[in-house]
Image (cartoon, helix red, strand yellow):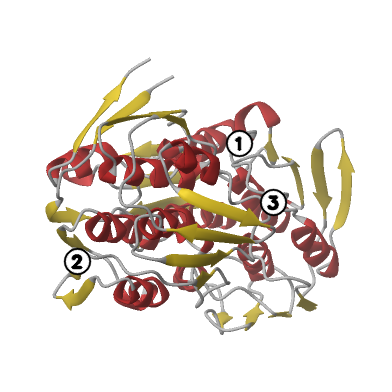
Amino acid sequence: MDRIIVEGGHRLVGEVHVSGAKNAALPMLAALLLARGTHCLRNVPDLADVRTLCNLFEIMGAKAERGSGSRADAITLTIGDVLEPEAPYELVRTMRASVLVLGPLVARCGRARVSLPGGCAIGARPIDQHLKGLERLGATIVLEHGYVEARADQLIGGSFTFDVISVTGTENLMMAACLAKGRTVLENAACEPEIVALANLLNAMGGRVQGAGTPVITIEGVEAMHPVEFPIIPDRIEAGTFLVAAALTQGDILVKGALPEHLEALLQKLRDTGASITVEAGGVRCQGDDVILPTDVKTLPHPGFPTDMQAQLMVLLSVAKGSSMVTETVFENRFMHVLELSRMGADIRIDGKVALVKGVQHLSGAPVMATDLRASASLILAGLRARGQTEIRRVYHLDRGYERMEEKLRALGAHIERVKR
């Protein structure tokens, strides 16, 4: 397996361009299954999960092609009249987002057979809200042999209230409802920017979605949708990771393409730690201070502090001048990076959903192992700050969500390299 080696102690300075959002690209690619014809999505990150989803489309009978040269960020997807509505375990076992094809397939084909999803080991993340919602729209659901099988001759619009806020559940039901007969109302829906991006795509395809970005989304079903060319929004989590890197190394980084309206909760926490945040034409700049101040943070659904930034911010707090509390309310197992940070000298104690982080003067490089996607990024950040060399193993997690991260960091002045297996 590939490893990443980081030599710490170098200040990061310069500009970095944020890639398209993984968490927007996957549902938006899945949404293209709703319409026959040739689609094109632009600003699509070249990530392992995106490649897996495109391979899945090929198995279903569609044709997915990534552009080259100046069009290298574009994926063209040609959807024919006939699709094989199955997502096999062998292909999607490592990618939780595979469940996003369930709604479009049952809406378009009348049936779907999708392997129960895998992905990062950060909690159970059940898909019961997806299944309850599809049943509310008239689908028959059977769980058998590790697969979800859904059938419906015609989905029928209806009202559904999520028991808990679910981003992928909201996305799945939005897509399914576009081809349902009549009106669907989703209450207690997720409000993330990626939900808004998906709604914009669906409307561009001929859908009728209103209220995305609020807790109540209304979808008027249509008989058919049409192909589209559409851009992917910038990745707010990648942008946030580079902003934290600037604060952590007392650096000065302009993250080009970052949208401040998607980052408000994080930007406020960075200011609380003493970093200088300025919004500039085309991006957001973070300048780190010599003294990092402690602050408390609690992860919440958007517009609260994103759980996907919790591990990265914890690294910053681990070298703050004082103690901080980090409360994780979204996923139950999202402190697995703490043991690895402790190997590097961090002083972090966990009590249930709360981590007490006592700032230390410095971190020390050490061999560490990534347990999930965001933990991978946090360990690289820790290596940037640490004295000596840090070796991060299992970086295949990183490649699921960050495009050429080590190359972008190296261009900012980091001493970082990937060692191939």
Element class at badge 2: loop
Name the residue that disc number 1 marks.
60
- Mark 1 or mark 2, whichever is nearer to me: 2
The answer to which of 158 and 12 lies nearer the viewer is 12
Q: CA distance from mark 3 to mark 2?
A: 47 Å
Name the residue that disc number 2 marks.
289
**Who's the residue at 50% across and 78% down the image?**
303
Counting residues from the start of the chain, the first of labels 3 and 2 encountered is: 3
Q: Amino acid at mark 3?
A: Leu
Element class at badge 3: helix
How far from the left and from the top, in percent, is residue 63?
47, 37
In the displayed structure, does residue 165 sit left or right of residue 34?
A: right
Q: Amino acid at mark 1?
A: Met
In the displayed structure, does residue 232 sit left or right of residue 15?
A: right
Q: Amino acid at mark 2?
A: Asp
Counting residues from the start of the chain, the first of labels 3 and 1 encountered is: 1
Q: CA distance from mark 1 to mark 2?
A: 52 Å
Rendered position, 392 above or below 276:
above
The crowding category of the residue bearing disc 3, from other C-alpha atoms within 10 Å (few below 14, some 14 to 19, many at least 20), is many
Element class at badge 1: helix
The answer to which of 53 and 417 lies nearer the viewer is 417
Q: Which corner quadrant of the image does residue 367 belong to?
A: top left
The crowding category of the residue bearing disc 2, from other C-alpha atoms within 10 Å (few below 14, some 14 to 19, many at least 20), is some
In the displayed structure, does residue 281 sit left or right of residue 181?
A: left
